Amino acid sequence: MMPTEIEILNSVSFFQDLSTNELEILSPIIHRVKVHEGEILTRRGMPASALYINLTGNAMVSYKEDRAVTLHEKGDVTGLSAGVVPSVYKGTAVALTDGEWLSIAGHDLVELIQGNNALGEKILKKIGAVSRERAQIMDGE
Amino acid sequence: MTGLENISAHNGWAIVCVGVSIVVSGLATLSFAIAQLHKLLGLWDNRRNLFQKFKNRKENMESQETPVLELSLDVQENIRNFKLLTAKIGDPFSLPKLIEYSEKCGLKSPLSTINTLLTAKVIVPDGNGYFKWFN
C-alpha cells in the first residue's frame, strides 16, 4: 500500500483544517484501500485495527439493535474505535459499492496521538465529534 | 344644399373625425417608433451577448430543475420486492435486516441497489438508526 499524496488528503473534509506540515506527518501512515461491494471493513466486537475515511465509496455501518448509518460522502469516517487502545469496533461496516477508502492502522494512530500532542489532539477531536453525532445510534438509546 | 349643411346631411363630420383620428394615430405611432429606434439598433448591435445571456439563463433554469430520476426496470422491480419485505419487517425498518432478508430471498445485488435507493432518497434515514420509504 502506498502512502497517500498530500493533494488527496487536502481534498478530504476530515483533513481540511490541517496544515501542510501536519498532512506531511500523516501522509506516510494513511493508505488507500480499494474495497468491493459486500466487503467488510470493520466487524462489531473485533479488535479495532484501523480507521477508515471515505474517498469514493459507500458503506453501511450497523450497530446494536440492527440500527445503522450509511456513509456516502468523501470524508465520512468509520472504525472510530481505532484511536483508543485497547478497543473493539462498535459497528460492522460493509461496503455497499466498490470504492476507495483511506485507512490508518490503529497502532499508527495511537503512536501519533501519543507522540504528537497538537496533531494527535486535533485527530482525537475529529473522531470525538463523529462519535458524538452517532452516539444515539451506536448505543441504541 | 351647399356648404356646411351638405356636409352634415352626408355624415361629413363623422368622416372627418374618423379621418383625423386615423392620421393622428398613425403619426403618433410613427413618432413613437422613431423615438425608440435607437434602442432597437442597440439590441441589434448586442444580439450576440443577449443570445448568450438567454442561453445561460436557460441552462441555469434547467440545472435547477429537480432532475427526474429514471430507475431501471431491475431497480424498479427490486423496489417492489423490497417493499414487500419491509411490509413484513415494519416501517421504519432496519436496513441490515432488509439486506439480510433480500439476500435470503435471492434478490440481485441488494447492497448496490439499496445504495442507489439511498442516494436517490427513495429510502431515507429516520434519525434513530432506522430507515423509511420517502413516499
Image: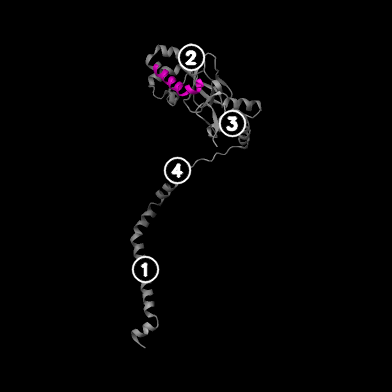
Element type at mark 3? helix
Front-most of residues B62 and A30? B62
Q: Nearer the viewer, mark 1 or mark 3?
A: 3
The alpha-carbon separation of the residues under discs 4 and 3 comes to 31 Å
Question: Disc 4 or 3, which lies upstream in sequence?
Answer: 4
Where are the magenta residues, as a range? Answer: A121-141
Q: Nearer the viewer, mark 4 or mark 3?
A: 3
Q: Callout 4: residue from which chain?
A: B
- Disc 2 crowd rating (10 Å Cα; few below 14, some 14-19, many 20+) is many
Disc 2 target residue: A106
The reply to the same-chain question for discs 2 and 1 is: no
The reply to the same-chain question for discs 4 and 1 is: yes
Question: Disc 4 or 1, which lies upstream in sequence?
Answer: 1
* Residue A73 percent across, percent down from the top left: 48, 28
Front-most of residues B133 and A16? B133
- Disc 1 crowd rating (10 Å Cα; few below 14, some 14-19, many 20+) is few
The reply to the same-chain question for discs 4 and 2 is: no
Q: Callout 3: residue from which chain?
A: B
The reply to the same-chain question for discs 4 and 3 is: yes
The alpha-carbon separation of the residues under discs 4 and 1 comes to 43 Å
The reply to the same-chain question for discs 1 and 3 is: yes
The alpha-carbon separation of the residues under discs 1 and 3 comes to 70 Å
Disc 4 target residue: B60
Using the image, tell me which numbered label, if any, was put on residue B113.
Answer: 3
Colouring of the image: one colour
Q: Which amino acid does the dot numbered 1 rest on?
A: Ser
